[in-house]
Image (cartoon, rainbow, N blue to C red):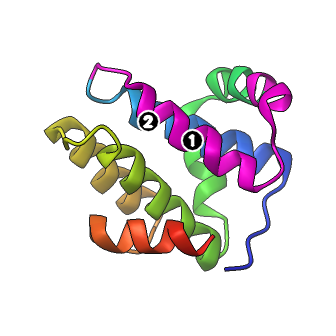
Amino acid sequence: MELQFRRFEFEAVVSLALAMIHADGDVDFKETMVLQMQLDRFGIGVDQYQSLVVAAKNMDKLRALSIITNLGYTEKKYITALLGVLMAADGKIDDSEMKMWTFTSLVCDLPQMSIDEAFEIIKEV
C-alpha cells in the first residue's frame, strides 16, 4: 500500500487517532503503542512523535475531519483501518468507540470495513 501524507495530514490523522484512543474514557498503553508504531512506519520517530501529538491536540476537530475528507481513497482506507485497530487494541470495543468509528467514516466518506479487515490492512502497511 503506497501512502502519501503531508505534515498537516499526519496531524489530522493523529488528531482523530487520539480522539479514538480517548473515546472510551480509558487510555490504554496498547493503544498509544499501536499509534506510535504506525507513525514509526512512516519515519516519525519518538523525537518527532511528541511535537506531532501536540500539534494534533491543538488542531480543531472540524479541520481534522475536513483534511481527512479530502484525502485519496488509499489514505482513507488506511485511516479507517488505523481507527479500527486502535479501537480494538485494548481487547475490548466500547460502544462509544464504535459510534466514533461509524461517525468519522460517515462524515469523512471513509470506506466501510470490519475489524478483521482493519487488522489485515494495517499488516500490509
Residue 108 sits above or below residue 48 on the image: below
Residue 38 sits above or below residue 114 on the image: above
Rendered image quadrant of residue 97? top left
Taking the image as shown, residue 91 lies to the left or right of residue 34, namely: left
Percent position (x, y) of residue 32?
Answer: 51, 31
Mark 1 surroundings within 10 Å by alpha-carbon count, few (fewer than 14), some (14 through 19), many (20 or more) = many
The type of residue carrying mark 1 is Leu
Residue 33 forms part of the magenta stretch: yes
- How many marks the image carries: the answer is 2
Q: Main secondary structure of the magenta part?
A: helix
Rendered image quadrant of residue 114? bottom left
What secondary structure is marked by label 2?
helix
Please state, as top left, top right, bottom left or bottom right, where the C terminus lies in the image.
bottom right
Q: Residue furthest left?
A: 95
Percent position (x, y) of residue 35?
Answer: 57, 41
The answer to whether residue 58 is visible is yes
Which residues are the magenta region?
25-51
The residue indicated by pointer 2 is 31
**Contact (CB < 8 A) between labels 1 and 2?**
yes
Residue 122 forms part of the magenta stretch: no
Residue 54 sits above or below residue 17 on the image: above
Residue 30 sits above or below residue 74 on the image: above
Rendered image quadrant of residue 24? top left
Please state, as top left, top right, bottom left or bottom right, where the N terminus lies in the image.
bottom right
Q: CA distance from mark 1 to mark 2?
A: 6 Å
The type of residue carrying mark 2 is Glu
The answer to whether residue 113 is visible is no
Instruction: Name the residue: 21% across, 36% down.
Output: 96
Q: Which mark is residue 35?
A: 1
